[in-house]
Amino acid sequence: METINTDVLIIGSGAAGLAATVYAAQSGQNVLVIDKGAVGKSGSTTGAVQIASLGDWSDPRDNEDAYRNDIEESGRGLSDPKLTQTLAHDISERLQDLISWGLKLDVDEQKEVALSATSGHSLPRSISARKGKTGLGILQTLIRLVKKSRNVKTWSDVITLELVKSSGRISGAIVYDLRNNLPYFIESTAVILATGGIGQLYPVTSNPVQSTSDGFALGLGVGANLVDMEQVQFYPVSMVAPRSIAGFCISFYHYSKLYNSLGERFMKNYEPENMEDTTRDKLAIAIANEVVAGRGTPNGGVYLDGTEAITQIKKEFPHEYELCLDRGIDLAKHRAEVGPAAHFMMGGIQIDEHAASSVPGLFVAGETAGGLHGGNRLGNNALSECVVFGARAGMGAAEMSLKGMNSDHTDLEEWKDKWSPLFSTTKGKIRPYQLKQRIQEILGEHVGVIRSDKGLQQAKVQLKDVQAQLAEVNIKKDFMSREILDYIEVRHMIQTAQAIVGAAYMRKESRGAHYNTDYPSLAAETQKTNVQFSNGEFTFHTFAPKGGVS
Amino acid sequence: MAQLQVKIQRTETNTKTYDVTHSPDMTVLDVLEEIYHHHDETIAYRFSCRTGLCATCMMMINGKPSLSCMTIAEPNDEGYLFVSPLPKGKTIKDLVKVPAN
Ligand SMILES: Cc1cc2nc3c(=O)[nH]c(=O)nc-3n(C[C@H](O)[C@H](O)[C@H](O)COP(=O)(O)OP(=O)(O)OC[C@H]3O[C@@H](n4cnc5c(N)ncnc54)[C@H](O)[C@@H]3O)c2cc1C
Ligand code: FES
């Protein structure tokens, strides 16, 4: 196997990975950014509409403390105060950087930066760029800089199989180039994981096809701590039909009305004060409850009526209005069938305020990192997280490599056995995509919005079966082979799925996005869950959060 | 469910025909997924967001450059859906181009 050398390796090229790239590159160190899809076009970031902010345009009452309080309030006791403080502290500077690099913020009729309200934020704080295609705008801004930096290389269509550790620290990663069907060892002083989320573990998701939870499995593989993996955010109001846009997020639910099949505006029974304008965890649980109680629509959702706010909807969310129209649903006239879709992983690899994980040399940023959002992420805080912690990860990793903290000679013996189906003829009957679908079914049935101990136990057993079936796959070997990609992804998915199920089973209460019908209320004491993997076994435990969060 | 005849230009000299089970709400991307799952595991095409934002699923559909996730699958005048790679840039395999970056 060929070895490629770099100072900093960045895995994933969404907002977090590319922010890390740009800040790491400022040090002059050599930076390599890889992506299993097309660099800069393959993650959740392209779908993001707005970003939460502090800046010259802020409401006069807004400040770091107010922003931080909102995150911690929404985190249901699970947000790490060091991370919330860092986010609130750095965000305005990071946005200034992006603006100075050419990001143009959207403005209102008075030509002022357009500021809008988002559920759960106590003050209007959301801004956008590129007419509501903010994620894309940020990616394009960062890519322009990447192209200009001589010390940055990008590499599309390479997927990470494993991170590599030697003498207790990260020494690089083993990757698989899908174009020429070859593995490589990328040796680097520091690695930044920015592989995005987990949506593809579920049958209905807002996430792109690449969101197969790879980063969580990669972290587990080198002994990283994962926290609060049971905290999966379901976007409460996404399309359930037609199937070509199943999972598509509707951002304007707080201007709309939701009805069950009896024609009842059911949120009055759950959140009489805020109605639909409530946080995502509460709204998703309410909708799922209505469906379970038999008051759902034919496709298993509820009805969204946006007719009264249609002018505002067309103006603020034109892409959403038009895509629905294109698929035969004119929101000016018709109701849409909506329901929860897997959207965001609040848990993840535990990081400190420098985006460093517990494994020396491994930095993590964006959705793959855990601990900032706790039990519920507020809207538009994911992009702000990506730019703030992406930047910190980039700077931290570059600093480490400047100090030349290299590890000893790396021993690369075992990995090839573990991935032998990629290098030998397979004779099984099962196709990798079928195992992906099976994982989606299991998590959809037992680890969705509403969970129970019995369901979680079943999920655990069923996932073990899927893991056993991995030995019976058949992989058609070819260059740019989707079968190979699916096989590698399903291996990562099975690891992360087991981490989620185990963490969910540890939490004997309902908190944030985790709702267990056997324990429908909050426990008196706040505990975080932790997952680790070593010697082929998962270990799960709970611990009291530091910093006295209540 | 009806059948749709789909022709995919896989190389300059090789166009392959598939008869795919089809319903009227399917996009071209849905049809390609159907082919990958049930007809031909070697077929290669890019996509990511499924909602018209990333543009990685761009290809020639019935002779016009289009996003496969945003185009409802319909036969051309000759009675089949014709899919081929974008003419510009290097084709890696089937419908996959080298990304613009
Ligand atoms: C439809 C939608 C709308 C959203 N709207 C908003 C919004 O309005 N505001 C907001 O703040 N947040 C929003 N979010 C959430 C937010 O977009 C994401 O959490 C955030 O963009 C994640 O960025 P990231 O850089 O961590 O990962 P991503 O952008 O997902 O990028 C991860 C990259 O890593 C690559 N990758 C993954 N695994 C591997 C591997 N093994 N090897 C190599 N490469 C790999 C992927 O191909 C991908 O390119 C939305 C999410 C979705 C899905
Ligand atoms: S898949 Fe992203 S535009 Fe079609």
Image (spheres, helix red, strand yellow):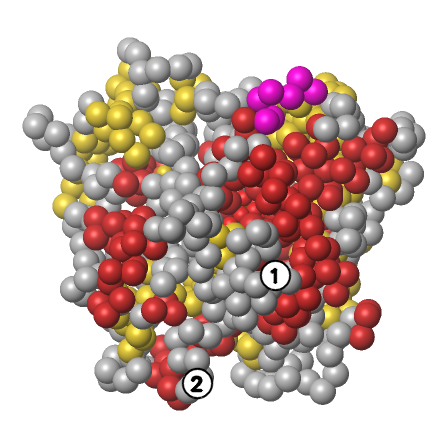
Q: Residue at 46% x, 24% y: name it.
A: B99
Q: Quadrant of the N terminus of chain A?
A: top right
Q: Give me the residue at 59% from left, 52% from top.
A: A55
Give SS at disc 2: loop
In which chain is the residue bearing label 2? A
Quadrant in the rendering for residue B4: top left
Near mark 2 (Cα within 10 A), the count class, few <14, some 14-19 or many ≥20, is: few
Q: Is residue B39 visible?
A: no
- Whether ligand 1 has any atom under 8 Å from the Cβ at mark 2 is answered as no
Mark 1 near ligand 1 (CB under 8 Å)?
Answer: no
Q: What x and y, as percent, mark residue A431?
A: 47, 42
Residue A50 in the magenta stretch? The answer is no
Q: Nearer the viewer, residue A120 or A371?
A: A120
- A114 vs A37: above or below: below
Residue displayed at 60% across by 20% down: A148
Residue for badge 1: A346
